[in-house]
Image (cartoon, helix red, strand yellow):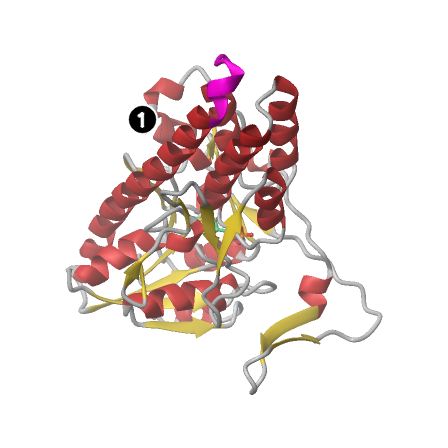
C-alpha cells in the first residue's frame, strides 16, 4: 500500500540485509521505521505491539528466527528462538504456524546454510501472505458487489485493524474494501475505535484515509444502534485464530458486533488466510485468550496541542481494571469465512470443502 505516494509493506528486508518494520505504536501521528537486528528485537516489537495483527506477527517471528540463526545456527539457538518468539503473544495462531514453517525449513540443513535458508523462507512467507490477502480481497469484492447492485452506497462496519498494516500488504478484512473502492464502488466504512488500544481509531482510520476510502470512526458501543437503523449493510472483521469448527477469535468486542448483526439480519463476514485456521482445535472454548496490562484500560494516550503524545488516566484512582484482548464469536453467528480459496460456511464441513487436504489433520 502507499504511504504519501510511496509503496510500503509492513515488514521487509532491504537489499543490504536490514529487516525493517513500521512502528505501529507511533501511528497515526508519526510514521517511523525501525530496524530489527536481533532475535530479541523481533520478540520485543511483537510484545510491545509495535507490530501486531496476526499475519504481521507471523512474518515478524519468521524474520526473528532468521536473525537468531545469523548469530548462532546451532540446534540449541534454534530452540531458544522458537521458544522466545512463541511466548510473545498467545492468541494469534499465525505465530505458531510461522515458527513451525521456519523450523521445518532449516532443521535438516547444515548449520552454515541455515541463516540463508531462513531468510529465504521468511521472504517467501511474506510474499505468500501478500498473494493470499490479494485473493481474499478478490473473493470479498464479489460480496460487496452484490450489495452495490442493490444500493448506491455500501456501508461496511469493521472492528480493530485487519488492514494492510496487520498483514504484510493488502490486509484481510480491508482488502475487499480497498478493491471495491478502486473499482469505483461507493463504499463507506464504519470504523469501531476498538478500545483499549484503539487500533480502529488509530490504524484502520489512518489506512483508509491514506487510500482515500470514505470512513467514519465510531465508539465501540455505536454499531448496534447503526445496525438497527439500517445503516450497516455488512460487517467484515479479521481474526487471530479460527478453529476448524469455524469459531472465530478476534479483538475484544467482535462477539458483541456479531450478536447485534445477527439480531438485525446484517451479514457478518470474517476474512482470513489459511495461516489463521487452527486445524488442531474444534471449539473456540480452547483458544487461549491474551490478558494484557490493566494500564491499557486505565489510561489513554493521545496527542497534545503541541504535538507531543501524552498518556492520561481515565478511570477512578484505585479501581481495578481487567484487559481481555480477544473474544470468541461462535460459528453460528458468522455468515461466512472469506478465505483465499473462496467464501466458506463457518463450520468444519464448510472449511474442509475448501481445504480437503486438512481432513485428517
Ligand atoms: O491485538 P492485535 O491488535 O494484534 O489484534 C489484531 C486483531 O484482532 C485483528 O483483527 C486480527 O489480527 C486480524 S489481522 C489481519
Above or below, 221 relative to 19:
below
Confirm if mark 1 falls within 8 A of ligand 1.
no
Element carrying mark 1 = helix
Q: Is residue 84 left or right of residue 187?
A: right
Residue 94 makes an appearance in the image? no
Q: Main secondary structure of the magenta part?
A: helix
Task: Give the x, y percent position of residue 318.
Answer: 84, 70
Name the residue furthest bottom. Answer: 305
Magenta stretch bounds: 106-115
Q: At which x and y percent is residue 204? A: 42, 63
- Is residue 335 located in the magenta-colored stretch of the structure? no
The relative height of residue 203 versus residue 135 in the rendered view (above or below) is below
Q: Is residue 267 above or below residue 190?
A: above
Q: Which image quarter: residue 122?
A: top left
Crowd tier of the residue under label 1, counting other residues whose Cα lies within 10 Å: few below 14, some 14–19, many 20 or above: some
Tell me where residue 149 sits by quadrant.
Answer: bottom left
Question: Is 111 within the magenta?
Answer: yes
View extreme (front): residue:
16
Q: Is residue 182 left or right of residue 297?
A: left
Of residue 266 and residue 128, the one placed in the foreground of this image is 128
Where residue 302 sits: x, y (%)? 58, 75
Q: Residue at x 40, y 20 (%)?
A: 358
Q: Is residue 264 visible?
A: yes
User: For the point 38% across and 45% down, which residue is it?
Assistant: 14
The residue under the point 32% across, 44% down is: 133
As drawn, the residue found furthest toward the right would be 318
Relative image position of residue 349 (x, y in whole percent)? 38, 27
To which residue does mark 1 refer?
Answer: 353
**Location of residue 104 with respect to 220 vertically, above or below:** above
Quadrant in which the N terminus is drawn: bottom left
Nearer-the-camera pick, 209 or 238 = 209
Please give left or right for residue 125 compared with residue 181 in the image: right
Amino acid at each position: 500500500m502507499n504511504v504519501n505516494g510511496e509503496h510500503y509493506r509492513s515488514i521487509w528486508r532491504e537489499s543490504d540485509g536490514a529487516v525493517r518494520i513500521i512502528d505501529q505504536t507511533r501511528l497515526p501521528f508519526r510514521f517511523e521505521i525501525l530496524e530489527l537486528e536481533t532475535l530479541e528485537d523481533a520478540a520485543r516489537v511483537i510484545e510491545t505491539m509495535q507490530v501486531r495483527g496476526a499475519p504481521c506477527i507471523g512474518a515478524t517471528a519468521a524474520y526473528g528466527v532468521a536473525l537468531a540463526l545469523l548469530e548462532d545456527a546451532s540446534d540449541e539457538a534454534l530452540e531458544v528462538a522458537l521458544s522466545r518468539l512463541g511466548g510473545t503473544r498467545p492468541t494469534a495462531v499465525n505465530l505458531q504456524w510461522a515458527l513451525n514453517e521456519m523450523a521445518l525449513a532449516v532443521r535438516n540443513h547444515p548449520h552454515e546454510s541455515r541463516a540463508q535458508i531462513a531468510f529465504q523462507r521468511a521472504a517467501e512467507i511474506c510474499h505468500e501472505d501478500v498473494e493470499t490477502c490479494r485473493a481474499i480481497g478478490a473473493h470479498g469484492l464479489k460480496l460487496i458487489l452484490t450489495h452495490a447492485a442493490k444500493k448506491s452506497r455500501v456501508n461496511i462496519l469493521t472492528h480493530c485493524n485487519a488492514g494492510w498494516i496487520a498483514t504484510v500488504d493488502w490486509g484481510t478484512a480491508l482488502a475487499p474494501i480497498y478493491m471495491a473502492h478502486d473499482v469505483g464502488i461507493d463504499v463507506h466504512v464504519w470504523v469501531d475505535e476498538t478500545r483499549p488500544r484503539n487500533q480502529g481509531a488509530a490504524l484502520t482510520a489512518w489506512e483508509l484515509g491514506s487510500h482515500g476510502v470514505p470512513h467514519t470512526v465510531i465508539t465501540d458501543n455505536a454499531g448496534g444502534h447503526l445496525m438497527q437503523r439500517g445503516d450497516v449493510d455488512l460487517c467484515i472483521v479479521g481474526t487471530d485464530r479460527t478453529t476448524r469448527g469455524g469459531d472465530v477469535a478476534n479483538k475484544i468486542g467482535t462477539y458483541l458486533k456479531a450478536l447485534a448483526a445477527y439480531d438485525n439480519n446484517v451479514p457478518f463476514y470474517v476474512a482470513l488466510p489459511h495461516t489463521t485456521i487452527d486445524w488442531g482445535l474444534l471449539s473456540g472454548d480452547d483458544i487461549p485468550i491474551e490478558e494484557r496490562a490493566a494500564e491499557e484500560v486505565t489510561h489513554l494516550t493521545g496527542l497534545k496541542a503541541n504535538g507531543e503524545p501524552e498518556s492520561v488516566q481515565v478511570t477512578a484512582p484505585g479501581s481495578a481494571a481487567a484487559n481481555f484482548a480477544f473474544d470468541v464469536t461462535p460459528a453460528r453467528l458468522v455468515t461466512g469465512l472469506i478465505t483465499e480459496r473462496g467464501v466458506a460456511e463457518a463450520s468444519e464441513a464448510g472449511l474442509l470443502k475448501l481445504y480437503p487436504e486438512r481432513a485428517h489433520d
